[in-house]
Image: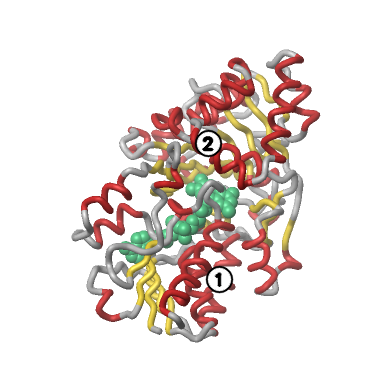
Amino acid sequence: MKVAVVGAGFTGLSSALYLARKNHRVVVFEKEKTIGGLVQGYKEKNWLWAIEKHYHHWFTNDNFALNLIKDLGLEEDLLIPSPLTSIFYHHQISAFNSPFDVLAFPHLSFLERLKCGVVLAYLKILPSFLAVKLERFTAYDWLNRYFGRNTFRILWQPLLDGKFGPYASLVNMAWFWARIKKRTPRLAYLKGGYHRLLEAVVSEIKKSGGQINLGKSIDKNIIKEYDKVIFTGPSSIFQKIFPGLPSDYRQRLSGIPHLHALNLLLITQEKILAKEYWLNINDRRFPFLGIITHTNFIDKKYYAGMHLTWIANYLPPDHPYLNKSKDELFAIYKPYLQKINPHFNFQRLTTNDYQLFLGPFAQPVFFTNYSKIKPEFNTPINNVYLANMDMVYPWDRGTNYAIELGYKVAEYILNTAGV
Ligand SMILES: Cc1cc2nc3c(=O)[nH]c(=O)nc-3n(C[C@H](O)[C@H](O)[C@H](O)COP(=O)(O)OP(=O)(O)OC[C@H]3O[C@@H](n4cnc5c(N)ncnc54)[C@H](O)[C@@H]3O)c2cc1C
């Protein structure tokens, strides 16, 4: 079978790998000049490794990703540290890694902390077949009810508001459950970064006879040249390429809003955060939602001794920050960064000390009862299949699930074609 895969992110590359290994003729088309999609790398000349443009790690239960790493003979090079997660609230950074940290969290009463520990433990042990039923509730309602109003206001509402902005109160509880369920204290990273894994996948695809075309957008005529087409980009682009889609199908796809990721990477000689890898900003007066310090997770020696810190945001497509230059954005963030670390001299940083990265359509919004509107692989166009992160649910979209999705769509095509 001759298959075109559109998109060289993890979904596209894993579906191409699956099909190429089964001796199908696979051609991958990627509109950008580099592979990786949302996991594209950034590297300065004197760095040993590239870093992802947006912060990335695996959980130790991300079995599709870890098995792929093993399959490609890279498992010896996995790093599995236990970096710190904390919360910034009321001018104070508090650790939030373990049940002990929950019980010691200073901004809740003892009873609230106890209740918080019990509800978190309940969510952690709740099996998925029961948890999917939580999609009937909004996370706002459920969390308010079971954690209590104050805990919701201090711990969870700022996270939901920060990530989903105008859609925060509509996100369903099954998605939130999956975030808690999935977390592992240790996180994984591959020596050489995610780019190394992507390169290994590409090399395996080529070895199995597949082809990768970079800098190549496709149009609807592609259907004529291939037996099957798998589209792995955002649904909005899919609709532009195939304008004749029936209106009910278009409505279904357009009914899923997306946030863009906007991350400012600070490259500094001194540390901005002493030890935290992940710092949630639980104060919505701040113009960003988190600070993630890659080099409190992975040794700075791979990046010429520089400290790498992202100032993270998810924004709706009409947000004014999306039109700001990196200097304008840094100027907005600077006074708030200063509040978090008053001793760091942010005035000294110049335009070469930071880079701005946009991840388009990076986070779908999962409303209540999402499973009923989740798109399927089949589309109204014969032999054209859609496989993108709108289908990764209730788990939070991630490369692990992109790999699973790629395998699944490939398997689906082979099964339905009777090959
Ligand atoms: C801020 C942020 C943090 C994240 N953190 C993590 C993390 O810690 N761990 C983790 O595992 N995952 C994380 N993720 C999620 C992860 O990056 C994604 O789930 C995954 O990369 C999605 O892969 P994909 O192939 O489905 O989509 P994409 O990576 O979006 O790939 C789609 C590809 O299709 C291409 N394309 C689109 N239209 C066309 C066209 N017309 N012609 C040709 N090509 C086209 C695009 O250029 C792109 O390369 C994070 C994402 C973001 C934004």
Could you say whether the residue bearing mark 1 is in a helix, strand or loop? helix
Task: Kindly indicate the quadrant of the structure image that contains residue 327.
Answer: top left
Name the residue that disc number 1 marks: 199
Is residue 159 visible in this depiction of the protein? yes
- Residue type at tag 2: Leu
Report the Cα–Cα distance between label 2 and label 1.
33 Å
Between 221 and 149, the residue placed more toward the observer is 149
Q: Residue at x 70, y 43 (%)?
A: 296
Q: Residue at x 64, y 47 (%)?
A: 306
Could you say whether the residue bearing mark 2 is in a helix, strand or loop? loop
Going from the N terminus, do you reach mark 2 or mark 1 first?
1
Above or below, 266 against 388 in this view is above
Percent position of residue 182, x then y? 65, 46
Between 367 and 268, the residue placed more toward the observer is 367
- Residue type at tag 1: Glu
View extreme (right): residue: 100
View extreme (left): residue: 244
Above or below, 174 against 5 in this view is above
Q: Residue at x 47, y 55 (%)?
A: 38
Looking at the rendered structure, the number of numbered marks drawn on it comes to: 2
* Colour scheme employed for the rendering of this structure: secondary structure
Other residues around mark 2 within 10 Å, as few (<14) / some (14–19) / many (≥20): some
Q: Is residue 286 left or right of residue 93?
A: left
Q: Are marks 2 and 1 in contact (CB under 8 Å)?
A: no
Q: Which mark is residue 100?
A: none
Name the residue that disc number 2 marks: 349
Percent position of residue 412, x then y? 47, 70
